[in-house]
Image (cartoon, rainbow, N blue to C red):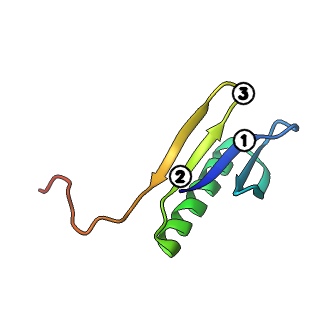
């Protein structure tokens, strides 16, 4: 599982990191979340590996997105 982390930096803005490397910094929260989700989705589609996005706060880790194995068939409702 490859994790992308959204975390507030000392300046009060937000950073995105993965595997110990910061990939974006000093972003508003909505932009940081979007950037992390886009990066996780692209990684998943390129590698086929499971990826997830988490927001790390002072007291909790909040899951924001998860990209798992692609399904071979549609399992949702039909019209």
In 3D space, how far apart are the residues under numbered discs 1 and 2 (Cα atoms)? 14 Å
49 vs 11, nearest the viewer: 49
- Front of the two marks 1 and 2: 2
In the rendered image, the residue lying farthest to the bottom is 46
Secondary structure of the residue carrying numbered label 2:
strand
Residue 36, given in percent of the width and then of the height, sits at 62, 55
| Mark 1 Cα shell of 10 Å, populated few (<14), some (14-19), many (≥20) | many
Residue position for label 2? 52
Q: Secondary structure at mark 3?
A: loop
Which residue appears at 71% of the width and 52% of the height?
16
Q: Is residue 16 left or right of residue 47?
A: right
Which residue in the structure is indicated by mark 3? 58
Tell me which label, 3 or 1, sits earlier in the chain: 1
Q: Secondary structure at mark 1?
A: strand
The reply to whether callout 1 and callout 2 are in contact (CB within 8 Å) is no
| Residue that numbered label 1 is attached to | 7
Q: Position of residue 78 (x, y in %)?
A: 13, 56
Q: Residue drawn 62% across and 48% down? A: 33
**Cα gap from disc 3 to disc 2, whole angstroms:** 19 Å
Outermost top residue: 59
Identify the residue at image location x=49%, y=66%: 49
Place residue 14 in its image quadrant. Answer: top right
């Amino acid at each position: 599982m490859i994790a992308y982390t959204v975390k507030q930096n000392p300046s009060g803005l937000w950073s995105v990191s993965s595997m110990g490397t910061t990939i974006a910094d000093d972003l508003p929260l909505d932009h940081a979340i979007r950037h992390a989700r886009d990066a996780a989705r692209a990684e998943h589609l390129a590698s086929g590996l499971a990826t997830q996005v988490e927001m790390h706060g002072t007291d909790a880790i909040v899951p924001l997105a998860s990209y798992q194995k692609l399904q071979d068939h549609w399992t949702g409702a039909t019209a």
